[in-house]
Image (cartoon, helix red, strand yellow):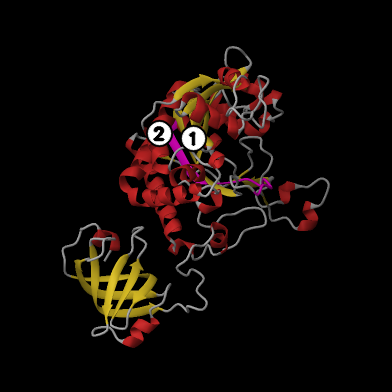
Amino acid sequence: MNVNKILNGGLQKGLVKVKGWVRNKRGSKQTSFISVNDGSTINSIQVVAEAKKISEETIKNITTGCCVYVEGSVVNSIGSEQKFEILAEKIDVLGPADVSEYPLQPKKHSLEFLREKAHLRFRTNTFSAVFRLRHALTYAIHSFFNERGFTSIHTPIITSTDAEGAGEMFQVTNLEASGLNAKNIDYSNDFFGKKTHLTVSGQLEAELAALGLGKVYTFGPTFRAENSNTSRHLSEFWMIEPEVAFADLSDNIDLAEEFLKYCINYCLKNNLDDISFLDNRMQKEESQLKKEERSEMGLIERLNFVLKNNFVRIQYKEAIEILKNSKPNKKKKFKYIINEFGADLQSEHERYLVEKKFKKPVVITDYPKSIKAFYMRLNDDGQTVGAMDILFPTIGEIIGGSQREERLSVLKSRMREMNIEEKELWWYLETRKFGTCVHSGFGLGFERLIMFVTGMKNIRDVIPFPRTPKNANF
């Protein structure tokens, strides 16, 4: 029987059978109170074990972390923590846990410590909440696109194309090391007959599908070989990339705003207990920080901030002018000074626009072509492209996208400017020869969205088994 169902009154009082893991145990010789959680909810159910029904030997073997089977009656709880509890008739220890070795005893553990125990951290309140929300967001994403007639496309994990020109990719090969050390490597002898790597994006392939199916989306793993050990970077992460035929930049922004609000609203509606727990956790942590380091919004307040506000839309050149004449606060200037058109915006600039200037989520459009990818549609001014970034409080950019360049001659010109060989993307160019049309899309890093919805500050805490430089454990 599901603990969540019992605690939420979905079961009439009577005999139930529950299996789960013991969070803690307290009590006296006559009566023990055992907290059991089965992963279905942030809340554990209290099991009351009386000595006249449950043997002393069994009670002795019930320790924090062990797995138990409980039969008993659901009764009204005398305590104020929950409405119901289970009066045990029978308890079996399915899997013991040696109290001298079990690392997750009932005390506060640091997130760093729990990353080292990733095989067990699902059992903690914090991570059970995070990963239930990860599931909820996965479901919401598929529901959103399915309800709007999108087709799900599985794009290649192994590819010979670098969609973004990043250059930091994991090579896939079965050539021996001696062959890889040669000056002129003959990849015709490699497994795929050419140089291949793990994908950094499924966008280009999704575009091909959209120009035949109309509306598609990808939801899959991507890989970056960037040697970065920060709280915002992973070597393996998940991306959502919709592509829509006949959609211009404005349509693209509308879709992205609707999508983000749908996902956040779904979590607030279906996982409020988990979000409330994480909100309280975040506020306790914030109270220990210096005043200037604290966030101005709690987690639930931040989520409602997105839901209740229309996103502000401004052009990049307007954003630059605002930032050139602004300070994040009265005491100091920006760490990274913005003084010219063409500068890349940093997180501090993005957060200032959202949290201080407009007090709403912000969409920045029409970036200089020099800092954006070759496939973004060139604007009439010849200097900017139809790109857009959506900025959120606390994390800055959450979505990046663009109207794609559908004009063959312009696309070829942009590729030449950026030293991208046409022969490598002949198939991409052919879509501009045969029935081309206006189309747009965006990319959302799934873990970035989970960080926003959960309030977690380190990206390694929102993916079950993080892959980072020098770390591929579990």
Residue where numbered disc 1 is placed: 393
Q: Secondary structure at mark 1?
A: loop
Q: Give whichever of 72, 335 is nearer the camera.
A: 335
Question: Which span is picked out in magenta?
Answer: 212-229
Q: Quadrant of residue 195?
A: top right
Q: Secondary structure at mark 2?
A: helix
* 217 within the magenta span: yes
Residue where numbered disc 2 is placed: 305
As drawn, is 421 to the left or to the right of 79?
right
At horizontal 36% and vertical 58% (from top left) the residue drawn is 42
* Quadrant containing the C terminus in the rendered view: bottom right
Numbered circles on residues, count = 2
Q: Position of residue 337 (x, y in %)?
A: 67, 27
- Mark 2 crowdedness (10 Å alpha carbons): few <14, some 14-19, many ≥20: some
Q: Position of residue 340 (x, y in %)?
A: 68, 20
As drawn, is 191 to the left or to the right of 35?
right
